[in-house]
Amino acid sequence: MANQEKPMNLDVNNIGLDELEARLPGHLAELLSRPGDGPALLVSALPGEYSPESISPKSGDPKTIEQRLWQLVGIQILRTGRPHEAVPIFQSLYDHMLKGQDLLGHRVHKGMPLVHMSDCYRLMGFMALAKRLTMLTLVEDVMLYQGNIDLNASGASRVTQVFGLPASERDRYIEEIHSIATANAQEAYFPEWIMQGLDQEWKTEIPALQEASTYVANERYIEHLRLKLPDASGKTLERLADYLLASIPGCRTQIRQRSASTEYDIICSIDGPRPDFLSDVGRYFVCECKDTDKPASYSMIAKFCRVLDSTRSVFGIIFSPKGISGRRQMRFAERERIKVYQDRQIAIVVVDSEDLEYFAAGGSFIGRLRSKYESLRLDLLRFQ
């Protein structure tokens, strides 16, 4: 690990790109100037050089030299016109800060990598993703300033200046964020947890076609929720499912909605044109969450199918860590799931504990859903 002492009275924010290569350890400076695979190698080299503790000052404390240098590496790559290669640099910094929080036991302000990732995606034309990351920046800055946010000194100002969120709506979200964070100090370590408590009226951007199949999610947050399962209340699995779904560009979610006859665990709607398999399944679909110690039964599948029927949905997802009964045996719930598709073209996809582990390790939720849908539709042996 590099051991760079912080000189007395040094404002690390004054360290600029002109000093970057001189201050970086030699092998990192060589990778930064290396064409081709240099940026990709930096993604693993930076966490190996700088410990999570060294880039994770307590929220409100000055930025460290290590954090500033990591930031400048990403900025340098971004300024050379390679936003797609800068994203993993800032993503790894964000992940390292989350790890630092766990090790040190205090909240770390993470607005800086989030706002830089937003800038990268905006330059790539991925406006829905960029806005989501700017909203997460807003969450972080509200917590840093304890509700009295200075928008003139905050990257969160982009939510209005760049994305056009009305000032009245921005101020409403600031109040709500502060209220949720104050009441949930420990969970507020993850800005994603806070943002799940807000409405989704800010989601006004229609994803670009290429963006629609890009899946970006916080693996540590997924793992944080996964390790809390099982939860007798069912709320943890619902929150995890909601996060996985809401991270699909253009997907709006609503938790625990009631009709005159039933309760929907999660309702999903998809905005914009879809270049992927979701174009086959319609604009709306419904999800059911079963956090029980047994696989979902035949009767659960039959009931869920009736719910899909009543909402005229042709696609649904059951989140059940224990899976469903009769899997790989073509019996019980699994056989009913197959028959429902064959008879009525209603596709029910099951997400189980193996899938949740896959997502926590960085696997794409969209990619896994596609594979499961294809397995059902084309009668393939994958995931059966």
Image (cartoon, helix red, strand yellow):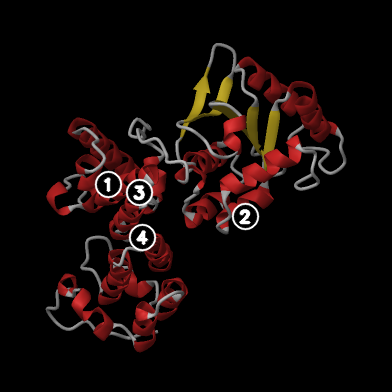
- Which residue corresponds to mark 2? 358
- Report crowding for label 2: few under 14, some 14 to 19, many 20 or more residues within 10 A (C-alpha): some
- Which residue corresponds to mark 4? 83
As measured in the structure, the alpha-carbon distance from the residue carrying label 3 to the one carrying label 1 is 9 Å
In this view, 158 is above or below 340 = below
- Relative depth, front residue between 288 and 316: 316
As measured in the structure, the alpha-carbon distance from the residue carrying label 3 to the one carrying label 4 is 15 Å
Residue 103: x and y in percent read 42, 68
Look at 52% across and 39% down and name the residue there: 245
User: Type of residue at label 4?
Assistant: Pro
Residue 266: x and y in percent read 54, 30
Residue 64, quarter of picture: bottom left
**Image quadrant containing the N terminus:** bottom left
Residue 105 visible in the displayed image: no
Residue 177 visible in the displayed image: yes
Which mark is nearer the camera, 2 or 4? 4
In this view, 52 is above or below 350 = below
Please indicate whether residue 58 sits to the left or right of residue 350 in the image. Answer: left
User: Type of residue at label 3?
Assistant: Leu
For marks 2 and 3, the one nearer the N-term is: 3
As measured in the structure, the alpha-carbon distance from the residue carrying label 1 to the one carrying label 4 is 21 Å
Residue sitting at the far top: 260
Looking at the image, how many numbered discs can be counted on the residues? Answer: 4
- Report crowding for label 4: few under 14, some 14 to 19, many 20 or more residues within 10 A (C-alpha): many
